[in-house]
Image (cartoon, rainbow, N blue to C red):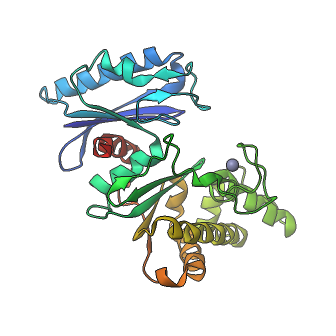
Amino acid sequence: MRCGVDIGGTNTLIGLVDENGKVVDHDCLKTSKYESAQDLVVTIAYSILRMAKVNGHVPIQSIGLGCPNINPEGRVEKAANLKFRCPVSLKDELLRYFPETPLFFDNDARAATLGEAVYGSAKGLTDFMMITLGTGLGCGIMSQGKILQGTNGMAGEVGHSILVPGGRPCGCGRQGCLEQYVAAGGILRTYTELCKKKNETIRASEYRDVADLARQQDETALQAYAETGKILGLALANLVCFSAPSHIFLFGGVAQAKEFLLDPTRKAFEENLLFCYKGKVRIELSGLSDSAKNAAILGAAALYRQA
Ligand SMILES: [Zn+2]
């Protein structure tokens, strides 16, 4: 049995995964309740030990831990969404409880990428990209069967590639980053701007509302997705030149908008692809799991593949 732990700004998910990729048991903690990494890790450790015990004292083959801004050595230098004091080594903390168990660490986008490779739709694929779409935009790149890390573990920060020079301001201090257009907040902003332009009442105060409106065939909401797809499709077409993937998988809350986003993205993607890639690269939704909770656990559990 492998264990996957996903530390998010709101919740921490802990789960046991069998060899068939089934989450057999899981636990959920409120991350924000823990003031220190030590307190959080001790609770995680007891949760893992409890689950192993109630599931017939199964041996834990490995523990994979996904967390924002963590490096493969298990160190968190700085994390905007986490309360506890940084820098901190989550590896040192976990080792106190699991000195014999192989431990693996990485950010959530790369965890999702490995999850897709081990348990999802990318089984057997050597070259693919995973785009995680939610509050932000993350990216994991599998190239020749290996996950790309870069010199400092920062490979794949494509959410901060500038798509619109002089465009929307970004939290990173620059303007026109991809994330500002295609992550949840960006889509809401596009919808709001379209409403103002058309002198329409704004009927969405958060991203979820835009998705609901699109499902009700609201013209402006659908238009917001069409605009988003144009930018995402262009960005992905550019990315293809970089590592020549056979597939690009879309993962996360925003990707759940399915055809509203997928159709315009695929269209803009094909239009902008370099001739030698045309018709050869597929954009698909992640096959990891229909449940976001399980997908996060599976991604973290699959981190053993990073070695
Ligand atoms: Zn940025």
Quarter that holds the N terminus: top left
Residue occupying image coordinates x 41% and y 69%: 247
Q: Is residue 194 visible?
A: yes
Is residue 99 toward the left or the right of residue 128 in the image?
left
Q: Position of residue 220 (x, y in %)?
A: 73, 69
Is residue 259 toward the left or the right of residue 282 in the image?
right
Residue occupying image coordinates x 57% and y 79%: 267
Residue closest to the eye, 44 or 146: 146
Residue occupying image coordinates x 48% and y 47%: 150
Is residue 216 toward the left or the right of residue 33 in the image?
right
Q: Position of residue 10 (x, y in %)?
A: 53, 33
Quarter that holds the C terminus: top left
Q: Quadrant of residue 178?
A: bottom right
Residue closest to the eye, 75 or 211: 75
Q: Is residue 217 visible?
A: no
Quick one: which residue is furthest to the front in this view? 151
Q: Position of residue 6 (x, y in %)?
A: 41, 36
Q: Position of residue 223 (x, y in %)?
A: 70, 72
Up-down: is 191 above or below 21?
below
Quick one: which residue is furthest to the left in this view? 56
Residue closest to the eye, 66 or 273: 273
Please tell me how many numbered marks the rendered image carries. Answer: 0
Residue occupying image coordinates x 39% and y 57%: 142
Q: Quadrant of residue 84?
A: top right
